[in-house]
Image (cartoon, rainbow, N blue to C red):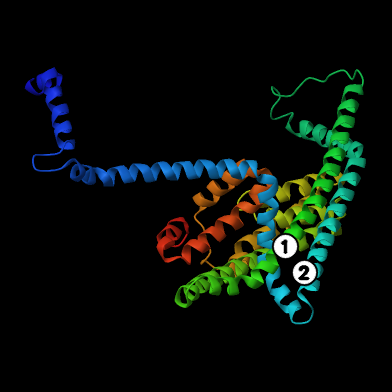
Amino acid sequence: MENHATAADPDAADDDLGSILDAASPKPGETAGAALLQRAPSLTGVRTLAFVLVIIATSLYLLERLEPILRPLLIAVLLCYLFLPLYNRLRRKMRPMLAFLFIASGFTLGILLLTRMVYRDVVEIDSKLPVYQQREAELESKFRAVTKSFTPRFTRPAQIDEGVEPEDMLTSELSQRLIRGAASAFVSISLESIVIAFYMIFLLQSASRLPQRITASFSSERAQGIMEIVESSNRAISEYLAVKVKASLLVAVPVGLLCWGFGITGAASWGVITFFGNFLPYIGPLIAVVPPVTLAFLEFDSMWPPIVFTLILITINGVTSNVIEPAMTGKALGLSPLIVLIGLAFWSLLWGLVGMVLAVPLTVIFKIILEHTPATRPIARLISDEE
């Protein structure tokens, strides 16, 4: 009771407030400057926190608003890490400008060829939509016949066929949207590949001159330390991207050949989707497997070929994801699953599907840079999957 009365007493509250003000005010024999210096650490912490929050908010805003500029630039940076060994080899045999043009033109032509193949597959799939709809209706009727005895209450009554004009109109509209979307994607990817090629030319040129610039800008000891960090980070990033691309090819090429062997429409497209889907952990293989499996069940009259196709496809993805790729990458570049999911959510929120593809490589590169900087090594251990 006494404690309750004391807590509710206004005089006691005034005493507490007075004690706080007395602690903040200078004591006898102490100047106002000395009291301010004693409170400086807390003020510095608040100011630092405010600066950090402002920097984070500004960075998020700029990443979202400058997406048309930063997205091709980041893709070009990642590609430079892949093509830098090839560029160094070509420089020994030809002039630097010819090496630039060779790599940039080869990259642009490769992207245009892939997008052209994907666009052709989309047009072919669109032309077969009536066949797919008929096959879908057959599968639906078979499924209802099988489940009719098990779930009689949930079986819909037969409806009178009053015409198919609404369905035909919906199919036509979906078909037109599919073609328009594919054509728009083809044009945008073609233009962005040209921009990426120009970025790569200047990035490769700047990368060759970076050691001289660092040596000229810093003292010899400082420049040597910076170059060690830069070289080790570049080596680790290049090795990771090279291994990831090889692992993606090891799963994409068999998937494309499997689709071609079974006669699935769009074999090239499913190979490309599998390649990029391999950069998305957990959800990437699922996204890459569902479309060809669906088409397999719609294109075959019998059920056994699509079942065999599905089993082989799942086996290829499972062996690559759980055996081949871990053996190639090792555990040194592992990320915490929570960090991977946060990275996927963050970059997909900013840049959509392209952000999801870039999320894991960018997060791994960020972790590698933190590992090779002594002051940030503890942060790299926190986000890694190492025990």
Q: Residues within 10 Å of mark 2 (few under 14, many from 20)?
A: many
Horizontal side, residue 267 vs residue 228: left or right: right
Front residue of this view, candidates 229 and 291: 229
Question: Is residue 13 shown left or right of residue 344?
Answer: left
Q: Is disc 1 surrounded by few (<14), some (14 to 19) or many (20+) residues within 10 Å?
A: many
Residue 166 location, quadrant: top right
**Whole-percent x and y of residue 223?**
50, 73
Provide the residue designation for mark 2: 100
Front residue of 41/339: it is 41
Q: Secondary structure at mark 2?
A: helix
Residue at the (37%, 43%) spot, across then down: 47
- Eyeballing the image, is 196 above or below 88? above
Quadrant containing the N terminus is top left
Q: 245 left or right of 7?
A: right
User: What x and y, as percent, mark residue 15?
Assistant: 11, 25
- Residue 200 circle label: 1
Looking at the picture, tell me which residue is in the foreground, 378 or 140: 378
Relative to 75, residue 324 above or below: below
Q: Residue furthest left?
A: 2
Query: Which callout, 1 or 2, points at the residue further toward the start of the chain?
Result: 2
- In the figure, residue 238 lies in which quadrant? bottom right
Can you name the residue that lies furthest to the bottom here? Answer: 92
Query: Mark 2 is on which residue type?
Result: Phe
Q: Is residue 286 visible?
A: no
Labels 1 and 2 touching (C-beta < 8 A): yes
Q: Is residue 146 visible?
A: yes
Percent coordinates x, y for residue 300 in the rendering: 86, 47
Which one is in front, 140 or 153? 140
Say which residue appears at 61% left-offset and 41% top-offset: 349
At a point 58% along the width and 67% down the height, the residue shown is 329
Determine the CA span between mark 1 and mark 2: 8 Å
